[in-house]
Amino acid sequence: MTKTLAELRSRRWFAASDMRAFAHRQRIQQMGLRREDVMERPIIGIINTWSDLSPCHAHLRERAESVKRGVLMAGGMPFELPAMSLGEVMVKPTTMLYRNFLAMEVEELLRSLPLDGVVLLAGCDKTTPGTVMGAISAGLPTLFCPAGPMISDRYLRHGQPPRVIGAGTHTRMFWDEYKAGRIPEDEWVQLEAKMTRAPGTCNTMGTASTMTCLVEALGLMLPGAAAIPAMDSAHTRMATDCGEHIVQMIWQDLTPARILTRGAFQNALVVQMALGGSTNAVVHLIAMARRAGVDLTLADMDAVAARVPVLANLFPSGNKLMEDFYYAGGVPALMNRLREHLSLDELTVTGATLGKNIDGRPSLDDDVIRPVDQPVSTAGALAVLKGNLAPDGAVMKPSAADPKFFKHRGRVLVFDSPLQMNERCADPALDCDENTVLVLRNAGPVGAPGMPEWGGLPIPKRLLDRGVRDMLRISDARMSGTHYGSCVLHVSPEAAIGGPLALVQDGDEISLDLEARRLELHVDEAEMARRRAAWVAPVQPYARGYVKLYQQHVTQAHEGCDFDFLQGAAPTPEPAIY
Ligand code: FES
């Protein structure tokens, strides 16, 4: 399949002989460009999620220049387009509230402007699914250029061996140590400057690295790109390659619709499980798949999780960082290890199949990318739970949890808000022990709103002081992909719309049976009916604006949390030419 100059989408803007086309060409020349720059070349949009408050993307302005260089060398014409940046740790209450906003922005930018293809510059958590979802719906040839993980650092303590440290997982670990009084104040302050020493995304297998690796597995990225450290010169060269390659993709008409098949999503699931990837990928993959017209369900994910072990020895399931994964060969090497589980004939952005892309890409470090018979964990990267507490499902990451909670029954402590949770957990007299089940509700897509990463509920202070580091915790929230613990997440339907989680009371008992995939609240049906009749929905203070739109249209976690009116692959008409 090849395209000619006359068939380019941008010709609708520039090549006509009417007054509007005259104005388009005129305004291009107003910017100092030449008429032939837009008349004789494919036009490439570079969606850039850089901003001064997006530390993981601090280098993306420079990378955009590299992409432009590649586009120009290949005979295209680049235009950089800023989009919402969503720096994960700066945005409150959560970037998840704005993922769909970014997706809408990207889709409408691509549709409304004279573009033939797009390079997406993103990587920090929600920016990856947000930009990809928008690009899928816009339908233009799309190439994802990942921000790349940050480089690692060392934590040196006198008299102790040096420890390699990264972002996210280590923050949580050190915070627990600090709260337990095991890290002095001056060292705690020094650690602020240690864990995130350079631009780039979190370097554990958190949500950012999970999502960029999955986009590579889907076939939307140049092979090996996801693991290249942001501050490596190879990253700059990769960005130039992206610019050069998108031009070829336009001539080949390599659109997402040709790449994102059910087989491609199955491949992404295999990689998600082998990475021990973030549970956040569950909602993002479902949302992306639905945009592509693929019906991906929690049951599909549980089935893949049951047969694919965790092979990538990366925090939080293992003990290495993304830099190690890069040296070991990255996603192509991991996928090469998993050939028997993959659909190798899927088309990718290279124009070749996945199988061809990963041929001859062995693991270069078997401690980082483990052989199939020496997995990091056989507990699985994901388990989908159902039961009377989660009729539409909930998820857990067994590979990052303490196995002693895989079959557990305990008395419940329930919190209605993070504020209440933090106050009660700080109380040294809180009535709880290590078998208590902690529950947080009203933290889902509608309730919070935006389903923040509050699902790694804190261990109560009195138990922390006794050395307790994990407990069974349940919520309708998400959890940061860099975190660990026995946390049941994404309980659906959520409490704020009347899901069973809303009816739980202190002192109830909840049981988890991981093997049976069951999550049950042990309260009889008559009592549940009484509580249901008495339940009153939490008051929502949002009477206007984007958040009101969000609460009216967001779908539940098991459906991907996309807006109901954005789902599906139904074609949207091209803008009118006048
Ligand atoms: Fe940006 Fe973790 S904060 S990737």
Image (spheres, rainbow, N blue to C red):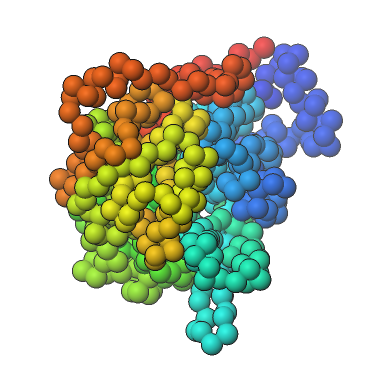
Most extreme residue toward the left, as rendered?
A: 516
In this orientation, which residue lies closer to the viewer: 514 or 139?
514
**Residue 234 in view in this figure:** no
| Residue at 62%, 23% in the rendered image | 112
Q: Where does the N terminus fall, quadrant-wise?
A: top left
Most extreme residue toward the front, as rendered?
A: 429
| Residue at 54%, 65% in the rendered image | 178
In this orientation, which residue lies closer to the viewer: 474 or 86?
474
Is 359 rendered above or below residue 474? below
Give the x, y percent position of residue 218.
39, 46
Give the x, y percent position of residue 276.
35, 56
| Residue at 54%, 87% in the rendered image | 159
Is 519 rendered above or below residue 60? above
Left or right of 170: which side holds 393? left
| Residue at 31%, 46% in the rendered image | 437
Quadrant in the picture for residue 405: bottom left
Is 489 rendered above or below residue 462? above
Left or right of 114: which side holds 160? left
Give the x, y percent position of residue 566.
46, 23
**Residue 459 in view in this figure:** yes
Give the x, y percent position of residue 177.
49, 66
Left or right of 11: which side holds 335? left
Q: Where does the C terminus fall, quadrant-wise?
A: top right
